[in-house]
Image (spheres, rainbow, N blue to C red):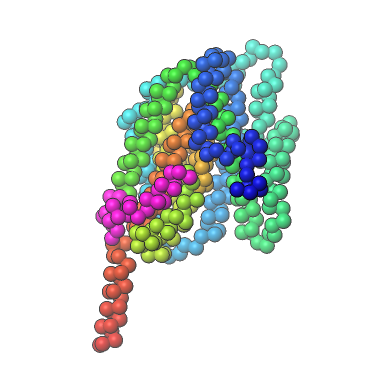
Amino acid sequence: MSNATKPAGLLGRWNAIPLYWRILLAMVVGVMTGLVLGNRAEVLEIPSKVILQLLGALAPPLILVAVTHVLMTTEVRGRLAARLFWLLILNTTVAIVVGLTVANVMRPGEWSKLDPPAEAGAGAGHEGPDPVDLLVQNVPKSILGPLGDKQNIIGVIIIAVAFGIALRSEKDRPLANVRDFVEVAYAVLLKMLHWIIQLVPLGVWAIVAKVIGVEGFAPFAAMGAFVLAVCLALLIQSVWYFTRIKLFSWARPLDVLRGVRDALVMAFSTDSSTATMPVTYACLKDNVGLREESASMGALVGANFNNDGTALYEAMAALFVAQLIGQDLTLSQQLIVVLTSIIASVGAAGIPEAGLVTMTLVFSAVGLPVSYIALLLTVDWFLDRCRTTINVLGDVNVACLLDGPTPPTIQATSIQADEGNRTGG
């Protein structure tokens, strides 16, 4: 490895470690910190609050630009486009219903209870504002919010610095049309998202230390139940995929599974459906034997909209947190969770931990405290890999169904026979 490609300094070596290892290490150190500090660890909730606030600020513009970018850059027309759209909506809806059903039956949030977050006015006995709270409040809750608030100069500066640094690598890029502008905006927002993701281990350390110090180990019994429930729901969703392939595609489920195993292993190891897209396409076309159009529609176009695992997880997370704090979600609220999860999953970028960004929208839609998302960070490194694998398996399912009940070789032979008959006639 050349000096140019070696990680520079301690921070560079730390960032070179896979994210899941950093999160695991943060959890271990967080447990030790919580045991040492006890109730004094409550102050460590602040870093996780800031990270979640930044994720929430990035969510609306990222979804806006991501969906705009996909619709501008993909070419999907005619009956195949309508069928693709129907399959994507059906799979995502089934995933969310499966997730909510498992969460309602198992009720993992009731394995342990946590007190709801303190209200904003809870510390009204202190004289003057707390400087730390004042700083946290100035961290932008939305990208454009501080621009309309003359008092929040710190928020404006934070946004200006972030955009200024992110745009340095794009400053010489020519803008010839609207598409170029959208692509620059998308690249800048993804770069900011990567920065925030680098802070996730810090947030995990802080929330684990705070929970262990103040609440003890009880909350993690509930987290264990949540992991079990999510894995069961994802397994049920995969059964749905293979059943549909068995009934409505010429490909055999076991052959499909063998053919795309490289893509599934890559999805789990890289935690990125975007990085896995070319491998998924190659596996579907070369190993499974799908037509090129079906493979590209499912693996490349569908991957931008087809985030079933993410939608399932976000719906289950909302119900889990509601059960955890004793806040029952009515049927209408769960319907809102379904609709919000579908919309949010479309905007989930195909990179690690992007589901954390859109989850803030799902929680806000039904009035759940966003602060509890920090608890999910303790197990998200594992569950994110599981749901990313299901996202890719969903792309495989769509591609197989688009290819139809007739294998390409049989269809080609049939066409040649028809042409021969017409010629002979």
Does the image show residue 368?
Answer: no
Does the image show residue 414?
Answer: yes
Residue that appears at 66% across and 40% down:
8
x, y (%) of residue 2? 63, 49
Q: Give the camera-side residue of 150 and 268.
A: 268
Does residue 267 show up magenta in the picture?
yes
Q: Is residue 126 above or below residue 70?
A: above
Residue that appears at 54% across and 15% down:
36
Task: Please name the predominant secondary structure of the magenta segment in the image.
Answer: helix
The total number of labels drawn is 0
x, y (%) of residue 132? 67, 22
Does residue 91 show up magenta in the picture?
no
x, y (%) of residue 161? 72, 40
The magenta stretch spans which residues?
242-270
Residue that appears at 29% across and 74% down:
413
Q: Is residue 343 above or below residue 247?
A: above
274 lies left or right of 298: right
246 lies left or right of 276: left
Q: Is residue 69 above or below residue 373?
A: below
Q: Give the camera-side residue of 224 and 401.
A: 224
294 lies left or right of 32: left
x, y (%) of residue 386? 41, 40
